[in-house]
Image: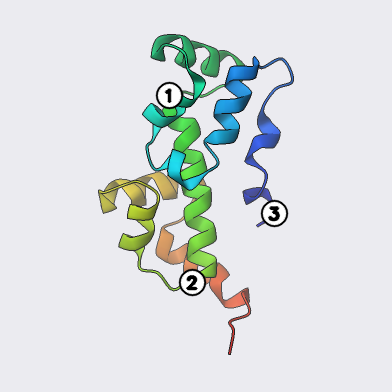
């Protein structure tokens, strides 16, 4: 679970300040709920330029970068809350539940339900 907490560690030192700021901003729920458009807005550059620099320095598109953050957030929510899958998907900014399932499985190798079954039991629940 520790790897879910430090997504900004992947920002290369050579990244321009605007990209580093956008990557940091993308970690906030208000920003990642907006998706790639929120990431590009935080970068303050044209979409094509942001996409090109992201692919060059991060190895992914802005959409893939934001979706990874969303799915890591979803994994934490599945482990630490009793919210429904629909609530978690909406909280991530994803309205289509089947799309949420596909993204989650691509990121974590299992469905959200399987993730919850596997990891939620190890979380201490308050009495």
Mark nearer the viewer, 1 or 3: 1
Assess disc 1: are there few (<14), some (14-19) or many (≥20) residues with their C-alpha within 10 Å of its C-alpha.
some
Q: Is residue 2 left or right of residue 19?
A: right
- Where 23 sits versus 126, above or below? above
Q: Quadrant of residue 103 in the image?
A: top left
Q: Residue 38 at what x, y percent from top left?
A: 41, 31
How far apart are the alpha carbons under marks 1 and 2?
Answer: 37 Å
How far apart are the alpha carbons under marks 1 and 3?
Answer: 29 Å
Residue sitting at the far right: 13
Please name the residue that numbered disc 3 is placed on. 2
Q: Residue 50 at what x, y percent from top left?
A: 48, 15
Please name the residue that numbered disc 2 is placed on. 117
Q: Residue at x 52, y 43 (%)?
A: 28
Q: Residue at x 41, y 65 (%)?
A: 113
Could you say which is closer to the camera, residue 31 or residue 112? 31
- What SS does tag 2 mark? helix
Please name the residue that numbered disc 1 is placed on. 41
Q: How is the image coloured?
A: rainbow
* Res 105 label: none
Could you say which is closer to the camera, residue 83 or residue 28? 28
- Where 61 sits versus 75, above or below? above
- Where 63 sits versus 100, above or below? above
Q: Residue at x 65, y 50 (%)?
A: 5
Mark nearer the viewer, 2 or 3: 3
């Amino acid at each position: 679970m520790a790897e879910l907490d430090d997504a900004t560690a992947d920002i290369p030192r050579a990244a321009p300040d605007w990209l580093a700021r956008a990557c940091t901003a993308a970690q906030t729920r208000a920003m990642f709920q907006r998706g790639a458009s929120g990431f590009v807005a935080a970068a303050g550059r044209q979409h094509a330029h942001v996409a090109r620099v992201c692919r060059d320095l991060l190895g992914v598109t802005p959409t893939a970068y934001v979706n990874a953050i969303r799915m890591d957030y979803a994994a934490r929510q599945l482990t630490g809350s009793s919210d429904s899958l629909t609530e978690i998907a909406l909280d991530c900014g994803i309205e289509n539940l089947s799309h949420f399932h596909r993204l989650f499985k691509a990121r974590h190798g299992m469905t959200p339900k399987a993730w919850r079954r596997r990891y939620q039991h190890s979380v201490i629940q308050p009495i």
